[in-house]
Image (spheres, rainbow, N blue to C red):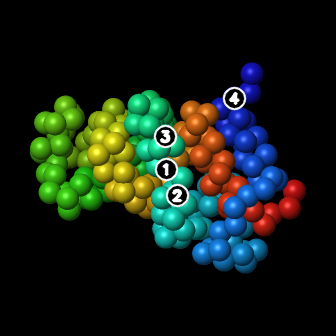
């Protein structure tokens, strides 16, 4: 059986070769074509990622119950410093909505309210809460910190990522 990464790669390749929706808002400049997710994460703008994730990561496509285990797995795989950055960004944006870090610590049963001290489980709880209760913040944080996306493995999530990948690669010829 193929690994999750191979499965993702195959779906993205298949979708990139098929009929895809055009992205009229994004430039069709060949320098804006991406080789892989890491290339996309490094060279795309936050606005491009926000637009793509906003179109693809919606509750009607991926329910919170499907997303939560994926987030737990993905967050466990990212580097600790990236995990800290993701946690800080979630806390910052949630604070702008009137949710204090201490209230979130109690409400979500986190081990701490300090982003830099949170473990993977804490960040996963925070991400799941945000996806469920504040999906716009979730998409914004992913657009700013896209590292989590490459570790998602659920076939439904991979399918959504494949749609995004097809859009990234729509002008690319194999």
**Which residue is situated farthest in the top direction here?**
1
The residue wearing badge 2 is 55
Which of the two discs, 4 and 2, sits closer to the camera?
A: 2
Q: Secondary structure at mark 1?
A: loop
User: With 84 as the anchor, is 104 left or right in this view?
Assistant: left
Q: Quadrant of residue 64?
A: top left
Mark sitting earlier along the chain (2/3):
2
The residue wearing badge 1 is 57
In the image, residue 88 above or below residue 119: below
In the image, residue 120 above or below residue 143: above
User: With 96 as the anchor, is 61 left or right in this view?
Assistant: right
| Contact, mark 2 vs mark 1 (Cβ under 8 Å) | no
| Contact, mark 3 vs mark 1 (Cβ under 8 Å) | yes
Q: Secondary structure at mark 4?
A: loop
Residue 147 visible: no
The residue wearing badge 4 is 3
């Amino acid at each position: 059986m193929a690994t999750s990464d191979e499965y993702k790669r195959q779906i993205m390749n298949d979708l990139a070769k098929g009929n895809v929706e055009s992205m009229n808002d994004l430039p069709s400049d060949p320098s804006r074509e991406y080789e892989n997710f890491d290339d996309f994460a490094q060279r795309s703008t936050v606005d491009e990622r926000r637009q793509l994730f906003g179109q693809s990561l919606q509750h009607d496509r991926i329910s919170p119950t499907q997303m939560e285990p994926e987030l737990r797995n993905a967050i466990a795989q990212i580097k600790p410093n990236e995990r800290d950055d993701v946690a800080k960004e979630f806390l910052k944006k949630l604070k702008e909505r009137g949710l204090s870090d201490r209230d979130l610590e109690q409400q979500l049963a986190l081990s701490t309210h300090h982003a830099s001290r949170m473990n993977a489980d804490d960040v996963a709880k925070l991400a799941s809460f945000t996806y469920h209760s504040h999906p716009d913040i979730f998409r914004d944080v992913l657009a700013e910190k896209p590292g989590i996306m490459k570790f998602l493995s659920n076939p439904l999530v991979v399918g959504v990522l494949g749609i995004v990948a097809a859009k990234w690669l729509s002008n690319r010829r194999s």
